[in-house]
Image (cartoon, rainbow, N blue to C red):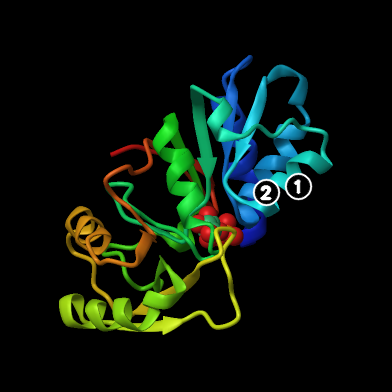
Amino acid sequence: MAMTQDEMKQAVAKAAIDYVVPGTIIGVGTGSTANYFIDELAKIKNKIEGTVASSEASAERLKGHGIPVLDLNSVDEISVYVDGADEFDRHLHLTKGGGGALTREKIVAAVADKFVCIADETKKVDILGKFPLPIEVIPMARSYVAREIVKRFGGEPVWREGFITDNGNVILDVHGLEIVDPVGMERELNNIVGTVTNGLFAQRKADILLCGTANGVEVLTD
Ligand SMILES: O=C[C@H](O)[C@H](O)[C@H](O)COP(=O)(O)O
């Protein structure tokens, strides 16, 4: 019987445990796939020093399992960061932030020596942009940033109304983009004043992507 998407998420979460370096601090992502990883990590919690979480939600789940959660400012090194994605291409450029955790995710990923992304084949695309690109914005700059995006890139920014990030900001989801140059667009979006973070993980992309397929887990590298 074919695997469901949930079963694929569970399979990649299990496979990611092989990348956990004993005795070190592990960066932990956010979302339904990362949640499965947290549940797997709980089984080997005595083998790691602790974790840094990329969201309040993940921190709660980790603590619920009795896994130590450390403040990033008290940590010098993270051996590996494990997190999901909303979309990925063959170069392992990612779109993230469907759950609104993109900023802390990008920070933890930046600190980590290695980024292991856990995703499934439904998220693979030739060109990023089918999944609306999330952008975290300072609330007072929302309309300005939306106008600038339309001017510079086209697309249709939609305010994720009623949603506030862990950092107290808002999200614009940009529909209808065709992201042919993810590195360039990531950089250019960062230049719009009022933007906190965009959901492109291209400058710091995944090093390894564990892709759940109907036939099992594939290990992808660029
Ligand atoms: O903000 C959320 C994160 O970027 C998630 O990694 C992303 O949305 C994927 O989530 P899921 O594993 O639930 O598909």
Q: Where does ligand 1 appear, by image quarter?
A: bottom right
Residue 162 in sight in this render: yes
Seen at 29% across and 50% down, the residue is 202
* Label 1: element kind: helix
Q: Pick the quarter of the image with the C terminus.
A: top left
Disc 2 + disc 1, Cβ < 8 Å? yes
Label 1 neighbour load within 10 Å: few <14, some 14-19, many 20+ = some
Q: Provide residue 195's location: percent of width, then percent of height.
A: 34, 65
Q: Provide residue 67's location: percent of width, then percent of height.
A: 76, 32
Amino acid type of the residue that numbered disc 2 sits on in the rendered structure: Ser
**Which residue corresponds to mark 1?**
61
**Which residue corresponds to mark 2?**
58
* Label 2: element kind: helix
Q: Pick the quarter of the image with the N terminus.
A: bottom right
Above or below for 14 versus 134: above
Above or below for 120 versus 99: above
Q: Provide residue 10's location: percent of width, then percent of height.
A: 66, 48
- Gap in angstroms between the C-alphas marked 2 and 1: 5 Å
- Is 43 displayed left or right of 205 in the figure? right
Residue with the most extreme top position: 23
- Is 84 displayed left or right of 136 in the figure? right
Q: Provide residue 179's location: percent of width, then percent of height.
A: 23, 66
Q: Is mark 2 within 8 Å of ligand 1?
A: no
- Residue closer to the observer: 157 or 176: 157
Seen at 27% across and 75% down, the residue is 177
